[in-house]
Amino acid sequence: MLYLSLWLSLIFALAIPGSVLARMPIIDGSANSRPAVIIVASVACTYLIVTYSALFGLPAFAAFLCVMVLAGLAILYDVVKPREAVAHIYSLRALAAGLIAGVILIGCFWVFWRQTPAVFLGSDTVASWNTWAREWAAGRIPALAYGYPQLAPAIWGSTYVWLGDSIQYGPTYLFVLLLILPPAASAMWSGERNPILALWMVGIYGAFVVHFRGWLGGTLLASFPDWLVVSFVASAMVIAGPRLLDPSSRQSDDSLALTTAQIYLCAAASIKPLAGLLSLAVLVSTALLRFRSSRTDLNRSVVVQLFAIGLAVATFMAYYVQVRNAVVLPAPRPATFAGQLVYGAEFVGKAVFPVFLFLSVWGLGATAFNPSVWPLSVACAGGFAIWARTASYDLRNVLPFVIASTLLGVCVVAKTMRDRGILQTLAERLVLPADRKIPVPPVVTLLAFALVVLIATLPLMKSDDDIRRSFLRDNQAIGLGTQINTMVIAAAKDGCWIGTNNSDLFYQHAMEKLPGKRLVGFSPIKVDEIDLRPVLSNSCSAIVILAPTLTEAARQLLASQEAVGRLRRASKLDWLIYASPGRFDPDE
């Protein structure tokens, strides 16, 4: 049952709500748009269901079941009345572009694909994001979210609604799939128009994400939600970039494409608010494109341009007010704004490979004076400036603008090469015939998502007991390290009390779910002798785990208890770990 619940939770978050919405007549784009629309609509619907269920005190699982019933009825209708079911007409070259893009991204993210099933590796994902996800799954709005947007924890929490919060594999699987499926589906959509450009952009995205090393690369391995922002921004750019830069080759599904890109960027802003600048930029660019293509008179065109500039300025001012009143964390940045920009540029230049920097700068410069795309250039430059002013110690916050401007640069280079006829011969040799169409029943699209999830989760196709044992084994070997977790598990018998300023330990699933063991107390701040006296007077077996910031009075109390044989030292590390005598042998 656990595996089935995991499989259903992933299909729901990725496909089921979107497959229901994609049947609506308003979704009038080509069939090639369906996968991208289904993914972003499913993510948005899952987020809304989890959020409003917690807001109104309703069971999220019941809402999930209602959507499942609607999807089941739609499938049943297609089976019972196949003649009335409208087949989706896919372009063969679009299907080929989507498949090749998926293979490219699986290759780029193979290190993640092969290590799943996996658990979170500690740090912010354990102490914050995953903790909030479990709160959402329990139907509670996180009280200590510190103002962070909650799309990532909410959709991770949707997997806990199906699985229960004792198994953590759902969120990590969802993280990997959201790195791969949205850009691949976007490449499939744009591949109908220009498959070479779509695959080029997807390849640049994959190479960009995996080329980081050091701490920033470690945040990718640790499943930080910031990388979902990069995935959503890249997906939006793959869809919207070619359409905005080349309005002469308009197609009937352009309105749906730009709307879908907007939703992807709104999803990104629901994880990192600053990415909302890109959403605004696409909105303004779409409006400018519409007015230019409708052949409006010159005066009206000038008014629209001025309105767009005013809207952009008003938005930047709003961000500026927030930035000015925000608490700026200490970092080695210059005092002047000009110096901060230089410092930020040097910081990015040292971390990002020169090819990506060249494409990024080229994209910003070439689109700055484009009558339709200049808002995107301004948004990327403005986002970088805000980041340099407030958070230039952390590259994660500027990555959405770097990947957006880089993919803009790819579009500009490709358009230049195409206008000069450089790509024409290559396109004629590689692109499949445009008139080759494949009719596909609507249910097949949903079944394709189900098959992808099934293949991705095959390593976890085990019995419930095997899944629980696997999770417990994986979880005990991460976070603060195998040594500390092993000491805690070996020392704790009837119960334990943890006093630590490192919340990673407390939020370990394995620590909370150990059979027959319980936490009878926890202190997230500096531990004093006032905290220790009730524990030491408790008759149950107690283990005390203390951070190095233990107060001197508490250290003296522990030393006195050790001197009389009440406690014994159970750790040779910097951490102070004490257990009742006879409960733990440090030499084992």
Image (cartoon, rainbow, N blue to C red):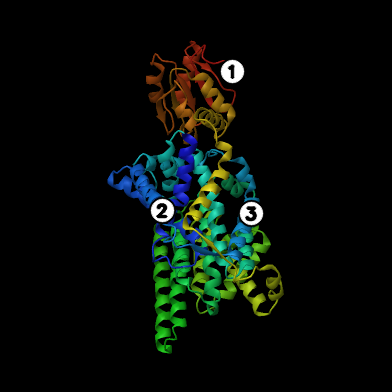
Q: Secondary structure at mark 2?
A: helix
Name the foreground residue: 314 vs 201: 201
Between disc 3 and disc 1, whose residue precedes?
3
The residue pinned by badge 3 equals 103
Label drawn at residue 586 = 1
Q: Are marks 1 and 2 in contact (CB under 8 Å)?
A: no
Q: CA distance from mark 2 to mark 3?
A: 35 Å
**Relative vertical location of residue 550 with respect to residue 55 in this rendering, above or below:** above
Query: In whole angstroms, how far apart are the C-alphas of marks 1 and 2?
Result: 68 Å
Q: Check disc 1: other Cα within 10 Å, few if <14, some if 14-19, many if 20+.
A: few
On the question of residue 148 being in view, the answer is no
For badge 2, the amino acid type reads: Val
Q: Name the one closer to the observer, 311 or 330.
A: 311
**464 above or below 148?**
above
The residue positioned 60% from the left and 64% from the top of the image is 92
For marks 3 and 1, give the CA distance: 49 Å
In this figure, which residue is indicated by the disc labeled 2?
80
Residue at 57% x, 48% y is 220
Query: Considering depth in this image, is 349 or 160 the residue closer to the camera?
Result: 160
Report helix, strand or loop for mark 3. Answer: helix
| Residue under the point 48% across and 20% down | 492
Position in image of residue 493 (x %, y %):
47, 17
Amino acid type, label 3: Val
Mark 2 vs mark 3: in front: 2
**Where's residue 279, x and y in %?**
45, 65
Question: In this view of the protein, can residue 322 be seen by the observer?
Answer: yes
Along the horizontal axis of the image, is 402 left or right of 540?
right
